[in-house]
Image (cartoon, helix red, strand yellow):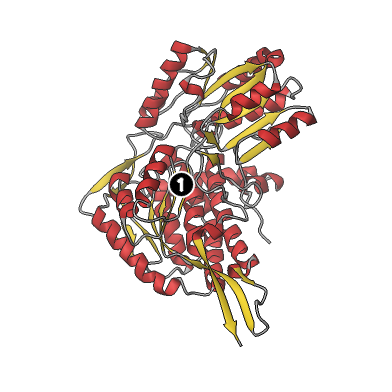
Amino acid sequence: MFENEHTLRRFLVEKAEGQFHDRYEKALEAARSEFGKKYPMIIGGRQVLAARTVPHASPIDTRVVLGRMPAGTAIHARQAIASAKKAFEAWGKSEWQKRVKIFRKAADIMSERKFELAAWVSYENGKNRYEAIGDVDEAIDFVRYYAEEVERNNGFEVQMKSAQPNEKSKSVMKPYGVWGVIAPFNFPAAILTGMTTAALVTGNTVVVKPSSDAPITAFKIIQIFQEAGLPDGALNMVFGSGGTVGAEIVKSRDVSGIVFTGSREVGYSMGRQFSSEKPRPLIAELGGKNPAIITETADLGKAVDGVMKAAFGYSGQKCSACSRVFVHKKVRDEFLRRLVEKTKDLPVGNPLEQNTFMGPVVNKSAYKKYQQYSRLADRDGKVLAGGYVRKDGDLKHGYYVAPTIVTGLPKKHRLFQEEMFVPILCVTDYEKFDDALRMANDVDYGLTAGIFTGDQGEVKKFLDHIEAGVVYVNRQASATTGAMVGCQPFGGWKDSGTTGKNTGGPHYLTQFMREQSQTIVD
């Protein structure tokens, strides 16, 4: 039976937290010994270099070059697609039991190397050690859960009723062909692994374009899949820009489907182009503008903790991050006092250090975006915490910013409407619960949402009327983030997603397959 990896929890239960830190520190040291290495792409099972390489620096300290990455071209993308198309001839007809066995082996290898992968996640995208190991745990969970789903559903083959006494009929789900996997920076292990595994374990072949901000983590995961026994060409990886490599994947006639996590604008543009000649499946998760409602009967201690973790965990760079709070007027001042106090005390700094809560934002673009949004917040509202970049000591060499809380903005202000993907939280108040629900739903997005209340009537009304794919009630661990594979299927409504079927849940895998009805007459 599937069980979540839960690395940190296991160490804590065993009272071995020191061992957790020792293993992480050793993994950091091992990763440092590889800094500056030149990495290849993987096409048709071979390592392929490019004519030009690009230095890949860490957001923790941009003076540190983690590796030199190949600048993949449209030609490389076409070669990878051709390789995947050829490999599909055999992989697409392989027995589901064989595929499941390979992915269970891959999960075991990832579990053995989880600290190595977590170290690279920290170096590449600035996650602290706890969030980095959580990212890798989620990747392992996706592999195991999807393998179990294929097995539980008998390879998605169902015996049907017989239309005639001499007929036997069944429904069989079969793979489409080549899938493009276009992955984001913020969960370089979990999201890339989940999308890739879903496509492959259902019999498709894959061309992966990792985020340019986290390519080394991707490379190491692809190597693990190869080691587990994937045949050459079933899984290919091409580094490069979205405008070059991504565009080639989208326009190729030989690509049957695309799975993508990223911005709404890119996703919708991709969808229009990908299906310009004929409809093709696009499974896209496109961000959020996630609210939390704090009612007058809420446990404010739980609410403050839940909102703070959801808003500022991984510097607000989660599509599920809480970016809007609607708090009842009667408890507004006390809630804000506690939230501001805790936020100002958050340890911000080098994420490799044991006690750091919030590391840097991922790149220069995010750094500038934070500053632009902070200026808007200061101009049009009242900034209660943060609103500035951090340049003290060694932080001046990275992309460090302060967690920010702003009130007093007009309720239709762009900061209440746009997905920012930086650690800025907008707070406003309400009098009637219906107004809070209306404001929570009054955005284009519908990914996650949370509520803190002691009123069961409000709980029911929230669950009946909130427009979001993932919702939480009184969740101190995090108001809007932290979905677990196999427990809380993750996906969005409205402009937050294209299919309404969530990752890590029972309805996800069939999107990568098409149904064939088979009837045999005796």
Quadrant of residue 88 within the rendered picture:
bottom left
* Residue 142: % across, % down: 56, 55
141 lies above or below 422? below
- From this viewpoint, which residue is outermost toward the bottom? 522
Position of residue 100 in the picture relative to residue 57 (left or right): right
Quadrant of residue 357 within the rendered picture:
top right
336 lies above or below 236? above
Mark 1 surroundings: few (<14), some (14-19) or many (≥20) residues within 10 A: many
* Residue 267: % across, % down: 41, 43
* Residue 12: % across, % down: 68, 44
Whether residue 480 is visible to the viewer of this picture, yes or no, is no
Whether residue 50 is visible to the viewer of this picture, yes or no, is yes
Q: Which residue is mark 1?
A: 188
Amino acid at the residue labelled 1? Pro
* Identity of the residue drawn at 76% across and 22% down: 297
Camera-nearest residue between 57 and 88: 88
* Residue 463: % across, % down: 70, 36
- From this viewpoint, which residue is outermost toward the front? 164
On-image quarter of the N terminus:
bottom right
